[in-house]
Amino acid sequence: MNITDNKLSRRVILQGAGALALVGLGNLPFGAPVLAAANDKYPEDAFKQKSDADAIKALYGKTAETSDKIKLDAPEIAENGGVVPVSMTTTLADVSSIAFVVAENPIVLVAAYKIPAGTVPAVANRIKMAKTSKVTVLVEAGGKLYRTDKEVKVTVGGCGG
Amino acid sequence: MTIRRRDFLKVSAAATLSAGLPRLARSADSASVYDIEKFGNARILHITDTHAQLRPVYFREPSVNIGVGTMQGQPPHLVGKAFLERFGIRPDSADAYAFTCIEFEKAAGRFGKLGGFAHLKTLIDKLRSDAGQGRSLLLDGGDLWQGTGLANTVQGADMVEAANLLGIEAMTGHWEFTYGEKALRENLARFKGEFLAQNVFLTEEARFNDAKAFDPASGRVFQPSTIKEIGGHRVAVIGQAFPYVPIAHPKRFTPDWTFGIRDEELQKLVESLRNNDKVDAVILLSHNGMDVDLKLASRVSGIDVILGGHTHDAVPQPAAVNNAGGVTLVTNAGSNGKFLAVLDLDISKGKINDVRYRLLPVFSELLKPDPAMAALIDKVRAPHVAAYGEKLATADRLLYRRGNFSGTMDLLICDALRSELDAEIALSPGFRWGTTALAGQPLTMEDILTETAITYPATYVQKMTGAQIRDVLEDVCDNLFNADPYYQQGGDMVRVGGLTYACAPMESAGKRISEIKLHNGQALEAGKSYKVAGWASVNEQNGEPVWDVVAKHLRAGKPPNRQGAGVTLKGVDGNPGIAGLG
């Protein structure tokens, strides 16, 4: 590898950084004045829920229908349960909110994002998983709520063939 | 020898696939089992999971290999008589001995050992010469560098030399990664073939730090594919490394790399090879394991043949899988050098017209060892022969490893762990490598290393609660019996000593294990703490290497423990993947 390649690779990474990665949940800019609707407050109640259904209800107040227009990219088996790379994109129009829920985590709501109009609806984050669980991504689009799910296994380590 | 040779020649069930419809052909009249009818214009030879077995071996195929979900009762999850019937192999024949566990000891005496690189070399050279100049290719599916004390000591360097002499043109990897990046790259610098892996990427941190990669833009660490001209046509070979290296093995060996099945990236690569490079055929050289390959073949289109390994399944006939682009054939070529796969292709512009596939057992006694390879094997072994030759004991019964739940060799290892480390319970990994010893055979240090030689051999003794032990059993069991192959890792069940349990493979995760008891019949208590010994932990340990613990146990000459595997199966009556508990 030469220096040119090094520069190239760094540039490619920076170009690819359009997807926002957020892990710390307490500092989300939900209070931004331009978005100051009633449900734009920090969703404190939703972040306290212990079941996925309760968290979805607390956050959105409605149930989600499964959509094949959401692409959830997560490993089948996590290499490290402490930092599991999970990302999503969607072709749904008018996306206003995206959230990630891990049903088996002690606190099931992992992250919630407000998507301003005109923003590409793509989010990549690394989440911490306590154990094997269904991982759900929720997308609010055009006033409706959609979801897609994937099982991510967190194993104690196994034995190869 | 005359009688033995006649035994061999009576029948050879070679599987032939024609026009997409599996059909068995028998070459009963042929002068030699290795004279293959000429077919097509390109011959691809495939070996996999040889586990560094330079010399011929005994290897007993499993008597328990249970398939769940859609794999239930399907190849490779057939054993014993069900296997013979499915593939039309005559009972009592040489092929029955090579492919199944039936009357293994009796047949071993009759047909002898299989494999050995000097014997493989002779056979490979003959088949390449039969195909003609420029019309063949030799591929290795990985797990080439690990499996013996010698390979472990020299970090696979012996196998790089053997691979070069054998003429391997491309390979992918699994245990190769457990030597760590530095040793891996040093070996690859000496390897004359290409190392292919489409599914190994730099971690985000490593990418940001500009760690070494084949393609910095994508983060791919290794070359993903190669294009070979065979018989006047362009054949693409894509490498698929074992997808779960950092999970099944200590992460410290591959800190900068992230793996996974990556079938979307694979699909893009196949399309690029087809559309941009205009290749005539696409082969996936895979270390996924057969169940994973069967699922992958249904999702990814445009691959003609998946030459598979990892799960050590010797499957005489390819499975034909339908997908959006047509049909993909999926094979698995056994282990330990026992088999050589021969894929003959009739290729024309942009497509494969027809194929013939054979999985040839490498009967060592039918093949004259290649002198150059024999000399190389002697040379690399020479510095270690004295140390490895020490006789530790005599095998008191047939000692084998392969099987979903247990094997007599692992019971011996568990006995050694419990007795030498003074533990109530022993846990031993369900590896699928490790050869077989016949009753009465001397057991040497080399034999014990062949069952244990890994780069993280340290033993441990720790306190575990009954609940933790149960969780480990459930967790490993799900790696084996998850109904979705993408969630399987391909090893067998962790072996236990001092413990019995019941297992219901068809149940869901967390509900398969019950009735866990200590050997004295007392139920394992969830809240109680037990002293557990083991080895091959993914966490760093500092106990004595397991091979020294086993050697000490054998040298002490204690009477053998003949307690059985202690596993009761539930809900799998009549499953053709069971021919006796092992």
Image: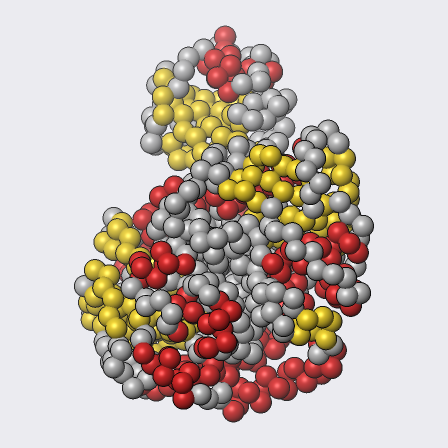
Compared across the picture, whether A83 is left or right of B169 comes to right
In the depicted structure, whether residue B508 falls above or below residue B436: above
Foreground of the two, B376 or B161: B376
In the depicted structure, whether residue B294 falls above or below residue B282: above
Foreground of the two, B359 or B322: B359
Q: In x, y percent, where is residue B274?
A: 28, 61
Q: In x, y percent, where is residue B523?
A: 67, 33
In the depicted structure, whether residue B343 falls above or below residue B421: below
Q: Work out which quarter of the rendered image holds the N terminus of chain B and state it.
A: bottom left
Report how many numbered discs are placed on residues in the image. Answer: 0
Query: What residue do we see at 74% from left, 49% from top?
Result: B533
Q: Is residue A102 visible?
A: yes
Foreground of the two, B133 or B227: B133
Compared across the picture, whether B497 is left or right of B316 comes to right
Q: In x, y percent, where is residue B409?
A: 62, 60
Query: What residue do we see at 60% from left, 69% from top?
Result: B439
Q: In x, y percent, where is residue A37?
A: 48, 10
